[in-house]
Image (cartoon, grey):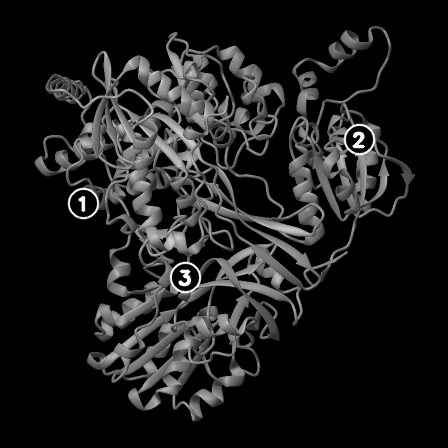
Amino acid sequence: MIYKVISKSEFRKFIDALVRQNTSFGPRQVDRNTADEPIYQFMPVSSVDDIEFDYTLTTSSAKHFFLPFRDQLSRFSFQNSDFEQHVAYEADPVVLIGLRPCDISALNILDDVLLNGRYPSPYYLAKRKNTFVIGMDHLPLPDCFCKSLAHHTVSTGFNLFCSDIGEKYYLSINSSKAFTYLEEFQTEEPSCEDNCLMTRRRKLISESFRTEVDVTSLPSILDIEFESPVWDKWGAKCLNCGTCAMVCPTCYCYSVDEHFDIDLKGASRNRQLYSCNLVDFAVVAGGHNFRPKNGDRLKYRYYHQHRGFAENANQQICVGCNRCGRACLTGINPKAVINDLRMEKESCMTCVSPSPDRT
Amino acid sequence: MHDLRFTIPRQDLNREAFASSVPDFNLKSDLMKTDMGYKCRITNIVSLTEQEKLFRLRIVDPEERRIFRFKPGQFIMLELPGFGDVPISISSASSNHEFIELCIRKAGHVTSALFRIDTGMHVAIRGPFGSSFPMDEMAGHHALLIAGGLGIAPLRAPLFWINEHRDRFRDVHLLYGAKEPSQLLFSYQFDEWKTISHIRLHTIVEHADAEWKGSTGMITELFRDITIDAKNTYAIVCGPPVMFKFVCSCLDRLGIPMNRMFVSLERRMHCGMGKCCRCMVGSTFTCIDGPVFDYWSVMNLKEAI
Amino acid sequence: MNQQGMHFEKLKIASFDFTCCEGCQLQLANNESSLPAFFELLDVHAFREISSEKHDDYDIALVEGSISRSDEIDRLLAIRKQAKILVAFGTCACFGGVNSLKNRIPIEESVVEVYGELQVETLPVRKISDIVQVDISIPGCPVAKEEVERIVVSLVTGSKVNLPKYPVCVECKQQINTCLFDLGEICLGSITRAGCSAVCTSGKTPCLGCRGPAEDINFPAFMEMVRERGLSESDLREKLDFHNAFETYRNDET
C-alpha cells in the first residue's frame, strides 16, 4: 500500500478523467423521501459533477456489479439431435466510485465465498478483475453497526481508498493501475500533519457509532436457539418479499433456470439472485418444502448471515451496513432480532423472566 | 476528447488467467467440469417400471472420457439443454470407464422430458460432485446396505464396488423394500447379486400382490431376519427421508456406531458447487459436504430429516 | 418442428374475448422482433386481432375478460368443452379485473348510471374460474408479452409452465428502484406476484396488484404495516379492490 494526499480540486480532476474515459458508477441522488431526506443509489455517472461525494448511504448495495441480479451462465445451440454449449466469462471494465468500507468488506467476503472455495466462480472473477474500486470513508449513520463486526475499516479489496481529512483526501493506493493514473495528477507524500489528521479522522469515525450489536458467540446462540419462539415472532412480521436479500451486499444465494429461445434453435441457462426468504427457496422435486413457515425462512437468512457456512470457514457474512433493516417494510432488523435472541437466551439462563412458551 | 491514458484495459479471462489468481483451479478443472458439461450420447434406455428408467450415457469425447472419474455415492448434474438440469446419483460401477448409468424417476419437468427422448440423443453432465461412501474404510468389515424404493439407485455403485472387491468384505447384506413387488428395481440382477456377489438379499414389500411370496411390511421388519455383528459392521442407508429416522434408530439399537452409518440426503441442488445455497441443510451443503453423511453429522444438522 | 431429437407440435390455438378491452390479446401482436418466431409455434384457429381464419378444432383456448352476461356463460361452457387447455388470459379473466368495480353497487344502479333508461341484461362480474375449470392462469393488466412467449414455448416443448412465486419487490429491487413507501405511497408490490419486471413501480406508479397475490403471502402483516405507517385506509382498500385480485384475503379479513 502506498499513501498519498491530494487536494480536493485535484482529486475532482482525477475522478473526472477516469469517469469520462470509462463506464463508471457512483452515488447519485435519485429521490427524496417523505422526511425530505435524499435517497442515493449507485448510478451511471459521466462526469465528476454527477457524483455526490458526501452522500450518506445507498439504499441498494454495489453487489450487483459483481453478481448481476440476472446473469447468463451458458448458451446452447441445437443442430438436430446434437448441441453446442458456449460458456463465456466476459466482463467490461467498470469504475465504481464511493464504496464504503463495509461495501468493500462485503466484496472481500464474496471473494472468500466465490473464489476460494472448491469451485471458484469464473463469472464473478471476471467482473471482480474488471472493476476498478474507489472506496471512500464516511461518518456512520445512527443505525450503522459495522463496527460491531469490525468492518468499519478496510485494508484490502479496493484499488484506491480515499479518506476525507478536510482540505485534502488521504489516499491509500492499493493497485499499480491506480498508482499509474495518479501519476498524471498532483499528489504529495503525506506530511506529519496529514497523518495526524488521518488518525483523528479514523478516531472520529470509530467514536461516532451509535448502534452496537453484540455478535459474540452468535454462531452458538443461533445453533442453540434453532427452535426459539423468537423466530415465530419475527416470522409473523415477515412479508417474504426478499427485499432484504436484494439490497444486501453479501447475500449471494441464487437459482438457476433454463429456457428455449422462442425460435427453439437455442436455449440459455441463467442465474437469478434469489433469497432464502422467498417461499419456494427450499422446495424439492415433488413439491416438498423443507422450510414451509415464514419464521423458518427468516431464521435461515439470519443463520447464513450470522452463523456463516463452511465455505468461508464459518465466518459471519453480515458486514453491519443495516441496508436490510432500513429496507424492510415491516421493520425487521438485525439489531432487534439478535438482541431478542440474546434476551431469550439470557432470560432462560438467569430465570429473571419466563421465556415465551415453546410449542 | 479521448485521453486513453485513463482507459482501464479490459482483462479477459481464460482458464489459464484464472488459474494464476486461484492457485489450484487449473488442477481442478482437469478433473471436473463445472460450467461446461461433458457431452454424452445416450446409448441405451431401459424401462424399469412406469416411473423409472435406466439411462446409459457415454461421454462423446475420448479425452473427456479419460478424465471423468467418480466414486460410489457421488452425483452428477444431468443437463437436458433447453429443459434444465437435475442432480442424479450415479448407478453404475466406478470402475466402468466406458459409460455411466443413471436410474431416473419421472418426478419434475426435466425428468419428464428425459422420458420422451430416445437413444442417440445428446445430453451433458457436470461433475462429479459431492462426497462418497467410504468404501476403503468399509473393507474388512461386514456391510449392511439398506435401500427403500429409488434408494437402490445410489446403492448400485457401492454394490458394484463390493462385487469387484468381494474378498475384502465379510458378510454383505442388502435389505431392500418397496411399496409393491412391481416397484422393486433391478430385480433382473437379484440372482446375480446373490450367486456371483454372495450378497444376502432380503426384500420386503408394503403391499403384496397375488404372486408375491416374500415378506410383507415395513423395511425395519427385515432386521428380525438377520443377525449382525454390530461392532464390525458398516451400514449404508438410502431411501425417502421418513425411512432414515426409523432405520437409523434400529441400527442405533443394534449397536452400530453412528460414524459407521451412512445416509445419502436428497435436496434440490441448482449448482452442485456450494454456491447457490439451495441445498443447504443447516449450515452444510448437501452438494459439497454431502450427499453422503455419516449419521453423527446428520444428527448435528438442523432440519436434516 | 424437430429439435434436440424431439418432435414438437404447433399449438392449435384460439383466442376469445369476454367482458374486457381486448388489450391482452393485442399484446400478442406486440414485440415485433420475436413475432415471426412466435407465430411459428402457433397454429391459429380463431383470433380476431390477428387473423380472419376461424376453425373450431383448437386445443388451447386463450380466454380474455370476465363474465358479466348470461350468453357469455354459454359461450364459455362451449369453449371449455372443446379446449384441452383453457388459459385464463389477463387480469379480468383471472380475477375479474377492473370490471369488478361494478359489483360494489347494486346492479340496477349501475345499469342506470351507464345506460340511463335503456334496459340492459347484465350480471355481477365473475372471473373465469367461477364458471369453468381453468388450466393455466396468465395474469397481468395487460399480460406481459415475454411471459406469454415463455409459456407458449413451454407448452410447445412440454417444459415447466410456471409463474414466479415471489412478489414484485424482488424485481423492483433488482431495478434499483426507490421503494414507493419511502415516498409515502401505498404499493402492493410486496404481496403481488412478480413477473411484470416491476414496470409500474419503475415508473413510480404504485403496484395495484394486477397479477394477483404471490404465493403464501403474509396479508395480515402487510395490512398491519400500512396501518402502522399511518397511510390512508381508503387508499389501501381502493388499491386492494382495484383488480379484485385479493378477494379471498379481503373476505377472510372481516
* Horizontal relation, residue C104 to residue A243: left or right: right
Return the residue at label 2: C17
Percent of width and height locating residue A187: 25, 21
**What element does badge 3 sit on?**
helix
- Label 1 amino acid? Ser
**What element does badge 2 sit on?**
strand
**CA distance for labels 1 and 2:** 60 Å
**CA distance for labels 3 and 1:** 36 Å
Q: Are marks 2 and 3 in contact (CB under 8 Å)?
A: no
* Horizontal relation, residue C35 to residue A145: left or right: right
- Label 3 amino acid? Ser
Residue pictured at 68% horizontal, 38% vertical: C148
Percent of width and height locating residue A244: 38, 31
- Tell me the crowding category of disc 2: few under 14, some 14 to 19, or many 20 or more residues within 10 angstroms, Cα based: many
* Horizontal relation, residue C165 to residue C63: left or right: left
Residue pictured at 72% horizontal, 51% vertical: C156
Task: Pick whichever, A210 or C90, lies toward us.
Answer: A210
A123 shown above or below B71: above
Q: Quadrant of the C terminus of chain A?
A: top left
Residue pictured at 23% horizontal, 42% vertical: A222
The numbered disc on residue B29 is 3
Percent of width and height locating residue A62: 39, 30
Q: Chain of mark 2?
A: C
- Label 2 amino acid? Asp
- Tell me the crowding category of disc 3: few under 14, some 14 to 19, or many 20 or more residues within 10 angstroms, Cα based: few
Return the residue at label 1: A220
Task: Pick whichever, B242 or C188, lies toward us.
Answer: C188
Dot 1 and dot 2 within a common chain: no
B180 shown above or below A105: below
Q: Chain of mark 3?
A: B
